Amino acid sequence: MVSCPRRIVDVSRFARSVCCLAFFLAACSGTGVRETGGPAGAGDPYFPKSGNGGYDVSHYGLTLAYTPAGNRLTGQATVTARAEQALTSFHLDLEGLDVTRVTVDGRRARWSRGGQELKVEPSEALRPGETFHVTVAYSGTPRTITDPDGSEEGWLRTADGALALGEPTGSMAWFPGSHHPSDKASYDIAVTVPKGLTAVSNGELRGERTTGDRTTFTWHTAEPMASHAATLAIGRYEVTRSTLRSGLPVYTAVDPTQAAPGREALARLPEVMEWAQHNFGRYPFASTGAIVDRPEDSGYALETQNRPVYPGAPDTVTLVHELAHQWFGDSVTPKTWRDMWLNEGFATYAEWLWTEDEGGDTAEQTFTEVYDHGEETYDDLWSFPPGRPTSAAHISDSPVYQRGAMVIHRIRRTVGDDLFHDIVRGWTAEHRHGNASTDDFTAYVERMAPDKDFTSLWDDWLYGKGRPRRP
């Protein structure tokens, strides 16, 4: 590579060098920029390589084909994004899989691989504010990713297909993108599978077409979605479609082995949805539902957007938890993984509220039980504050869930039930389909209750080490 000066100087000096003359002419035409590459990471405190800098994704168009025999995935991903700076190169996250071709706005682009990073060099530099389309063709055997906490995600093989789960980093195992919660986008996903299998994803089913021995399912998600909330379930399912009294469509897919208990568990979904909308505000998506797989397929429930995944038929409290996440985590998404407690604290507190409204222990009684005896039930309950997990391996530990819920309850006790209700509904409305940080939340609460002093609440319960003094 020939190196050129970074600054434009007198024209006569460029005439002495063909390289520099070319650079000068490009700069004068408005297309030349000095070499600027987008950062290979969004700067997350726990997952610094996740996501990418220099651009903002608005849409993913995924065309996939999967053959369970051999665990073979073929895909083409078209990522629509806007350059936030001049870009001579940028990165996408993609773990494993073989890339065969990359284009930017229809032109062949150079690319290289390094770990989970796919570096793309467009044939012409991208200007700040320019919308572009990068298309990646890829194939291979998708990987299962093990989190720092030991749980598995990414592409999970099942008895009759596969299950793709993404939190926090697994989505890069099946499609390239900017895989960080701060970069949300809409999705269109077309999946071709052997005839007799069903492919279930987020959003609404727009088409189902069988040609020969293959069936293609097309799914559309219009609302912004973080990639970790995307899912794809392939297998044999009993599909049920219905409509809530509000007119909201419901699509559920239940593994045949879980059919009877699954139907019984999901029978309360309409009731839980009405309860949640009363407490948290208008439902943020165009449909709802569930995917119920075998317990051995994942081992944990996950709040995949508008269609949570359950390992076997869920109990009602789990149903409440994952549906609450549609507001807290999926619609209002954390800016970084350090803000995870905003997801899990609210979803856990939803369990407390549901139990209270069902005539069980009040949220105050649950709070007291956790405070007095929680360390007997939850490992390392007081080991770190919910607002500052100690590492990536602990962002899903009990302090994030239980102590996070305790922070929410302390807010309720401080402001009273009526204002607390307004705070919760206002929070989900103000940040609907967006991202929010812990600082955003604390500032919002203080703005909603200007006559209250939250200093000790934040210092002791949200950020304080050890067990706070009894309230």
Image (spheres, helix red, strand yellow):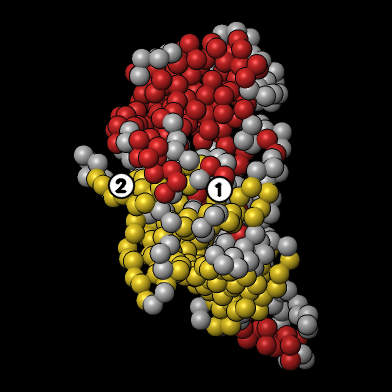
The residue type indicated by label 1 comes to Asp
Q: Residues within 10 Å of mark 1 (few under 14, many from 20)?
A: some
Residue 122 rendering spot, x and y as whole percentages: 60, 77
Mark 2 or 1, closer to the camera: 1
The CA distance from mark 2 to mark 1 is 23 Å
Q: Is residue 214 above or below residue 166?
A: below
Quarter where residue 53 is shown: bottom right
Q: Which mark is residue 250?
A: 2
Kindly identify which residue carries mark 1: 297
The residue type indicated by label 2 comes to Val
Foreground: 297 or 29? 297
Residue 317 located left or right of residue 150: left
> The N terminus is located in which quarter?
bottom right
Q: Residue at x 58, y 56 (%)?
A: 157
Q: Residue at x 66, y 53 (%)?
A: 145
Helix, strand or loop under label 2: strand
Q: Is residue 197 above or below residue 372?
A: below
Q: Residue at x 65, y 59 (%)?
A: 143
Foreground: 381 or 462? 381
Q: Earlier in the sequence, mark 2 or mark 1?
A: 2
Q: Residues within 10 Å of mark 2 (few under 14, many from 20)?
A: many
Helix, strand or loop under label 1: helix
Quarter where residue 368 is shown: top right
Residue 371 located left or right of residue 313: right
Residue 339 rendering spot, x and y as whole percentages: 58, 37
Q: What is the total number of numbered labels drawn onto the structure image?
A: 2
Q: Is residue 49 above or below residue 396?
A: below
Residue 205 located left or right of residue 75: left
